[in-house]
């Protein structure tokens, strides 16, 4: 397999990494030579915000071209496919047949490999839980060769691979249980939320489980951060009306730093003020990933890029924790450009899984030293409230805080060591967090 | 068209052919995938069938073995269908240190075998042929020191196709030669290349300009038509010094 040196960046654009990149076109390319000798990390579309797909000075394997669907059981809804297949591929192929992928993240361009590596969660967590719960089998390439792992066979390695950030092997194939999708259209209702107390209230399980999907946008711009006001969107499958096509493409963000504070303030204000109080019918793909129609939207943060902090606070500490975080941001005059808030109810079973019962908040910050400092302080507040940080979005977490937040990391590190996976698979993230 | 349409894709496992097969399948055309890697063909067939609900046959096929042409033509024969061909088989070696066997292989795969196959097809295929799309290269437009053999194989093929198109036109068969610049495939992954495009972009041009618009020569990206127009007319005493 030929390779070349490339400078890679992730969605956050705040750091670059020079790596030797291999790109197989088919499975046989991957197996023909031993690429595990020097330590390697697999990736596809690099939609994480941090450094999990970087292996600076080392090898990286680009799996995007291993994107074949291999078999589909129409009765059971089980898809076997290669790891480069994306959520977008699965939705366009299977929505007409009444199926959808589980745990759909905010961008549909995430690959199945990335979904496993981060045990991604979606807007219907209350019903179905995170991605890893629906993976029936994984074919994994390790120094021992190709092996199939399932929740019942090689269980330890399976639950280390779910949420395992690519550090247990290269996924070559997976078997996924799809979920029933009553329609490709959703009826979306908007509810105005005035403060953080109302958010916590709205996220009680009794209320959330009445809907198929649930997500909130919270205004943490300079005008909105004090109150924590926002909009709660609940959506249900809608079978009665006309089918619309998904928006797919709106425009391409030019490489200009358009996300200026004043503009963001206006955007956030406008979002709140002009919210549609009447229910609206939307295509499911538009509802689940509204930003996908703006190509390269991350360029709006300029060349320095941005950070996203996504944290989870358990239900019992969420109110006091988020009050403290919002007060901190107000006091320090730290404002987030875009923030999404969601409830989660089920616990991801991977050793390093992020999802657990609680409220998760994701905030975007321009890349500035005072923001980096603030992120560190917010992470300390999260830790103090028994919360955790989502590694898919992170590049600033330190080892001590990580170890406190992820008690299973010791078991993960031990497993990697015993199976010689730590020398075969490594990344900037594995070195930073010492796993 | 009353009959269903199907594509015979030769060299199906190449990334351009893969991308083209996906486009054609998305328009409801059936597929016959011919190539040298049966396992890969089976995976491709499964992928196309699942994504687009079309019928997809496979055939382990090496265009360098003429004794198997008849078998492939038999597989394509169907009175209900119009068969189109996408010929993507090709090979590229760095010409710095080339063995005799490699020289022979390049000429055989890029020049001799496509001609032999098309010659056999136009005379012996008993079904209806619609369009024949052949992948060439801008490298065929002028001989360069760096890739004289590759360029010759593609350039020579163009001359054959010109004559072939004239004969084919009498049977209402349209022939299109696609000349891409560098494509981002495994073949050139380790090299820095100008105006590199993805296999998907090339495949789209093949479909839109080669198949739908029925252009005889398709450059992709289009700018290569003008670049090669200029390059072809550079006097040799100047051209021989150009390194790129």
Image (spheres, coloured by chain):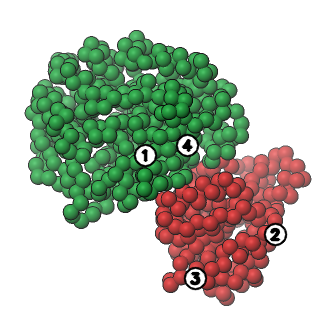
* Residue at image point 53% right, 16% down: A414
Question: What is the letter of the green chain?
Answer: A
Q: In the image, are marks 3 and 2 on the same chain?
A: yes
Query: Dot 3: within a 10 Å radius of its alpha carbon, few (fewer than 14), some, or many (20 or more) residues?
Result: few
**In contact (CB < 8 Å): disc 2 and disc 4:** no
Q: On the image, numbered disc 2 is attached to which residue?
A: B66
* Residue at image point 70% right, 55% down: B37
Image check: B204 left or right of A349? right
> Nearer the observer, disc 3 or disc 1?
1
CA distance separating discs 2 and 1 = 45 Å
> Nearer the observer, disc 3 or disc 2?
3
* Residue at image point 50% right, 44% down: A175
CA distance separating discs 2 and 4 = 36 Å
Q: On the image, numbered disc 3 is attached to which residue?
A: B80
Q: In the image, are marks 3 and 4 on the same chain?
A: no
Q: On the image, numbered disc 1 is attached to which residue?
A: A177
Q: Position of residue B4 (x, y in %)?
A: 53, 78
Q: Is residue A305 visible?
A: yes
Which chain's residue wears label 4? A
The answer to whether residue B54 is above or below residue B145 is below
* Residue at image point 27% right, 32% down: A344
Q: In the image, are marks 1 and 4 on the same chain?
A: yes
Q: On the image, numbered disc 4 is attached to which residue?
A: A173
**Shade of chain B as shown in the rendered figure:** red
Image check: A384 left or right of A48? left
**In contact (CB < 8 Å): disc 3 and disc 4:** no
């Amino acid at each position: 397999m030929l390779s070349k040196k490339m400078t890679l960046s992730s969605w956050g654009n705040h750091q670059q990494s020079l790596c030797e990149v291999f790109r197989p076109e088919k499975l046989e390319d991957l197996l023909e030579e031993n690429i595990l000798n020097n330590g390697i990390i697999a990736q596809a579309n690099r939609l994480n915000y941090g450094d999990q797909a970087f292996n600076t000075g080392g090898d990286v394997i680009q799996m995007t071209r291993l994107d074949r669907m291999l078999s589909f059981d129409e009765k059971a809804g089980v898809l076997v496919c290669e790891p480069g297949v994306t959520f977008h591929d699965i939705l366009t192929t299977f929505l007409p047949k009444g199926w959808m992928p589980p745990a759909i993240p905010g961008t549909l361009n995430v690959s199945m490999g990335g979904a496993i590596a981060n045990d991604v969660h979606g807007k219907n967590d209350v019903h179905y839980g995170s991605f890893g719960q629906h993976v029936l089998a994984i074919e994994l390439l390790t120094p021992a060769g190709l092996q199939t792992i399932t929740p019942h066979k090689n269980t330890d390695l399976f639950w280390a691979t779910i949420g395992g950030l690519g550090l247990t092997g290269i996924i070559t194939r997976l078997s996924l249980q799809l979920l029933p999708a009553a329609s490709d259209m959703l009826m979306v209702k908007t509810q105005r939320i005035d403060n953080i107390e109302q958010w916590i209230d709205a996220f009680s399980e009794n209320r959330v489980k009445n809907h198929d999907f649930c997500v909130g946008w919270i205004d943490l711009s300079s005008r909105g951060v004090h109150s924590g006001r926002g909009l709660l969107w609940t959506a249900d499958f809608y079978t009665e009306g006309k089918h619309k096509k998904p928006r797919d493409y709106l425009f391409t963000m030019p490489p200009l730093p358009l996300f200026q504070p004043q503009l963001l303030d206006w955007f956030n204000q406008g979002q709140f003020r002009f919210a549609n109080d009447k229910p609206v019918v939307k295509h499911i793909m538009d509802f689940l990933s509204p930003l996908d129609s703006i190509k390269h939207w991350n360029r709006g943060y300029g060349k320095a890029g941005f950070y996203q902090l996504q944290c989870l606070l358990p239900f019992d500490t969420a109110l006091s924790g988020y009050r403290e975080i919002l007060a901190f941001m107000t006091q320090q005059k730290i404002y987030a450009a875009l923030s999404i808030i969601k409830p989660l109810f089920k616990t991801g079973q991977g050793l390093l899984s992020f999802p657990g019962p609680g409220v998760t908040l994701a905030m975007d910050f321009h890349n500035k030293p005072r923001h980096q400092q603030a992120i560190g302080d917010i992470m300390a507040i999260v830790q103090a409230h028994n919360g955790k940080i989502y590694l898919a979005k992170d590049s600033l977490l330190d080892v001590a805080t990580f170890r406190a937040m992820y008690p299973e990391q010791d078991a993960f590190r031990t497993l990697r060591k015993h199976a010689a996976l730590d020398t075969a698979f490594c990344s900037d993230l594995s070195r930073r967090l010492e796993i | 068209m009353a009959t269903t349409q199907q594509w015979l894709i030769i060299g199906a496992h190449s990334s351009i052919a893969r991308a083209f097969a996906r486009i054609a399948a998305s328009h409801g055309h059936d597929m016959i995938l011919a190539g040298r890697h049966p396992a890969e063909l089976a995976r491709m067939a499964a992928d196309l069938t699942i994504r687009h609900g079309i019928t997809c046959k496979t055939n382990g096929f090496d265009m360098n073995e003429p004794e198997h042409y008849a078998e492939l033509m038999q597989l394509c024969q169907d009175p209900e269908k119009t068969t189109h061909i996408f010929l993507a088989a090709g090979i590229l070696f760095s010409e710095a240190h080339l063995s005799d066997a490699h020289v022979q292989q390049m000429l055989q795969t890029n020049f001799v075998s496509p001609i032999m196959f098309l010659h056999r097809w136009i005379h012996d295929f008993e079904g209806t042929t619609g369009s024949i799309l052949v992948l060439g290269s801008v490298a065929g437009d002028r001989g360069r020191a760096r890739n004289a053999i590759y360029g010759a194989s593609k350039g020579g093929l163009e001359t054959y196709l010109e004559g072939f198109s004239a004969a084919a036109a009498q049977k209402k068969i349209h022939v299109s030669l696609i000349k891409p610049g560098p494509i981002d495939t495994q073949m050139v992954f380790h090299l820095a290349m100008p105006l590199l495009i993805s296999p998907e972009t090339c495949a789209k041009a093949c479909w839109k300009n080669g198949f739908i618009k029925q252009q005889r020569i398709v450059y992709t990206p289009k700018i290569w038509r003008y670049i090669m127009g200029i390059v072809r007319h550079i006097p040799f005493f100047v051209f021989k010094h150009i390194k790129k």
